[in-house]
Image (cartoon, coloured by chain):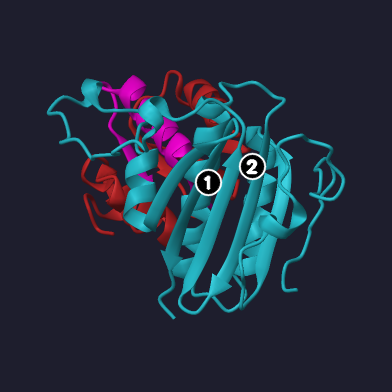
Amino acid sequence: MNLTAESVAEALVVNVDEERIDAAVAIQFKDRMRDLTAGAGGRIILDLGRVIFVDSSGLGAIVSVMKFLAPAHRLELAGLTPNVGRVFHLTRMDSVFPIHADVAAALHGAGHDL
Amino acid sequence: MSRRLFTAPGMISDGETGSPRREPAGRVSAPSTGEGFHLCFEADPCTVRRVLGQAVAELARGLSRDDAGTLELALAEVLNNIVEHAYDGRTSGQVEVCLHREAGWICCRIVDSGHAMPALTLPEGRMRPLPPRLDDLPEGGWGWSLIRTLATDLAYRREDGSNYLTFRLPLSR
């Protein structure tokens, strides 16, 4: 599972360099997120711009990450591709996460601008 | 006639398996007017991922992005449920996927020989209200509500130790 993190301004941006977050990698995704975000101070933005498919297992993993980061952090999402956005919408998880059009929008604006 | 067999590394095509639950060849494929996809494979998450890729590549030609997404998501949820529940994480289970395009639909039939659905009934998959506390958010359980949202004419039967699930996915064009 190819995840990398970089500090940008006050935020930790986690890039998902994978096309899928699905049942095959859900556990790896959670473990990697736990490692990458350990000790992070500010905002945490998950860049999903390269992800073209998330199933309910992948969505569950993202929700799980959001829960273990709380209350110190609120996990923010950026760059949802259309089919990924639809899974969040159909499960109403789009109302649970701050969702940004892309990382630049997340850094320069705030809130729900998808 | 329009039925085609696909075999990927590590997968078993219908013609090669000696599985006793295999149906006579004449019953395997539904009447089809368009492209079809038929595959038998081991139920594990990595194989499911490869099968989804193949199914979408094979059927998605000429489909809109949304329709291809619908096919991939519905099929993923059905197959994940089979891996996790029907086969309980066992690795020896076989799954048969039969898809074909027909007018404005993709018709799907999925067969496995794992555990039967509880009470021989498909889960309702009702979407629950979101809890007020983040800690109480579900981390799963959306599978059947997604399937029911995306698919129509869902039907399930248990016969001779196998689960038969059929449904149709509407195409937008």
Q: Residue furthest left?
A: B132
- The image quadrant that residue B26 belongs to is bottom right
Q: Is residue B144 left or right of residue B111?
A: left
Q: Is residue B17 left or right of residue B79?
A: right
Residue B127 part of the magenta segment: no
Amino acid carrying mark 1 in the image: Ala
Residue A11 in percent (x, y) is at: 37, 38
Residue B13 in percent (x, y) is at: 81, 49
Q: Residue at x 44, y 63 (%)?
A: B169
Query: Dot 2 corresponds to which residue?
Result: B48
Residue A71 part of the magenta segment: yes
Tell me the subunit letter for badge 1.
B
Q: Residue at x 65, y 55 (%)?
A: B53
- The shade of chain A is red
Q: Are marks 2 and 1 in contact (CB under 8 Å)?
A: yes
Q: Is residue B93 left or right of residue A3?
A: right
Query: Dot 1 corresponds to which residue?
Result: B76
Do the residues indicated by labels 2 and 1 lie within the same chain of the protein? yes
Q: Which residues are magenta?
A: A51-78
- Foreground pick, A67 / B25: B25
- Foreground pick, B41 / A12: B41
On the question of residue B105 being in view, the answer is yes
